[in-house]
Image: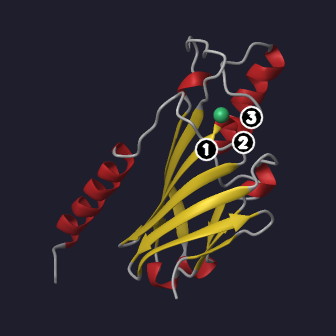
Amino acid sequence: MHRHPLIRSMIVLAFAITGSASTVWAAGKAHEHGALKLDVAIEGNLLTISMEAPLDNLLGFERAPRTDAERKAAADVLARLRSPDTGTPHFAADAAAQCALSKAEVQAPVLEPGAKPAAKDEHAEVQASYVFTCAKPNELRTLDVGLFDAYKRTQRIDVQVAGPMGQAKSTLKRPARKVRLAR
Ligand SMILES: [Zn+2]
């Protein structure tokens, strides 16, 4: 079906917004330390990656920082998540697809200034979403995931990919890093 390009991009945008809004985020929700979740979606020329991770995986604790060292560690993690392309990229699609990061959003309410201290047995998570715009999305084959390099406490990544070829689930176990995006 042919659609006007503007309409099409609006549909894609609506899809992206709905997708991130429907992701349940809750402090205190049970989660598994060492594991994180990635949702990867290919729609038109957009590659969208949503990540949900126990804060422990990235930082080693799941509460507001208490010391200067913890505050620095938390700020470093947030800065790193907001610039996923620095150093070893967190996510690298095939060079031939010519993808460039166009949006990065990171939410970690427990690390916000003035956050309420969590109760003793509470957990906290980080949610991040990234949008890459790809000049040649038909060239998307694999996604190289660099999260194991950056976050030593992460051992497993559960990945769900939704794209033109349908949906697929896979699991990366350290040190694996390649997610298949297309047949
Ligand atoms: Zn936890």
Dot label at residue 53:
1
Q: Which mark is residue 150?
A: none
**Dots 2, 1 in contact, CB < 8 A:** yes
Residue 44's spot in the image, x, y percent? 35, 73
CB atoms at circles 3 and 2 under 8 Å apart?
yes
Helix, strand or loop under label 2: helix
- What's the amino acid at mark 2? Asn
Label 3 lies in ligand 1 vicinity (Cβ under 8 Å)? no
Q: Is residue 115 shown above or below 73?
A: above
Quadrant for ligand 1 reads: top right
Name the side, left or right, on which 37 lies relative to 174.
Answer: left
Point out residue 74 in the picture as x, y percentages from the top left corner: 71, 28
- Residue at 55 percent of width and 50 percent of height: 51
Vertical side of 106 occupied by 129: above or below = below
Dot 3 amino acid type: Leu
Q: Read off the residue under disc 2.
A: 57
Mark 3 sits on what residue?
Answer: 59
Image spot of residue 115 (x, y percent): 56, 15
